[in-house]
Amino acid sequence: MAPTLELVFLGESKTVDTDRLADRLQRVFARVGAPQGNPPISLRPEEAIGRLVTEIVFVGDKKIRALNKQFRGEDRPTDVLSFERPHHAPEYPASVVISLETAARQAKDAGWSLDDEVRILASHGLLHVLGFGHR
């Protein structure tokens, strides 16, 4: 069975084109989670991806700051946080939390749309969920 990605959008997403975002994340997942050819690209070859349910949660700076402090010890807002699904309970979803306030500021500074910034942040978060880290 080919790996599948199921996306659930939570929080205030009226300002985000979730259809385009879902398309982008499906393409990222297909390329990394289920690539053509052998061997598959994965930092966790021992773990079958199978069905990956991922929540994309849109929040504000206040909420992401609290999560950043709780889970990373950083008392400041950030743009995106990722939470992998527990290995002992694969039925729980992975989560990618995005601050739309921070994303809007970053998009303005970079000169592109909020949708573009959110697609970048969500792709970044999904890669973390799949096991990729920073160098």
Image (cartoon, rainbow, N blue to C red):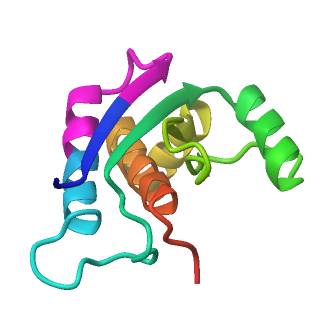
Task: Please tell me which residue is depicted at 24% across the width and 53% down the height of the picture.
Answer: 3
Residue 29: x %, y % from top left: 27, 56
Where does residue 86 sit, x and y in percent of width and height? 61, 48
**What residue is drawn where x is 51% and y is 44%?**
90
Q: Position of residue 14 (x, y in %)?
A: 38, 15
Q: Is residue 46 above or below residue 82?
A: below
- Residue at 49 percent across and 36 percent down: it is 91
Residue 80 seen from this side: no
Q: Does residue 106 lie above or below 33 as drawn?
A: above
Quadrant where the C terminus is found in the figure: bottom right
Q: Is residue 56 above or below residue 87?
A: above
Which of the pair 66/77 is nearer the observer?
A: 66
Q: In this view of the protein, which residue sits in the foreground, 116 or 126?
A: 126
- Identify the magenta region: 8-23
Quarter of the image for residue 9 reads: top left
Queried whether the magenta region covers residue 53, the answer comes back as no
Question: Does the rendering let one see residue 128?
Answer: yes
Q: Where residue 129 appears, x then y in whole percent? A: 50, 56
* Nearer-the-camera pick, 110 or 94: 94
Q: Is 59 situated above or below 14?
A: below
Residue 17 is one of the magenta-drawn residues: yes
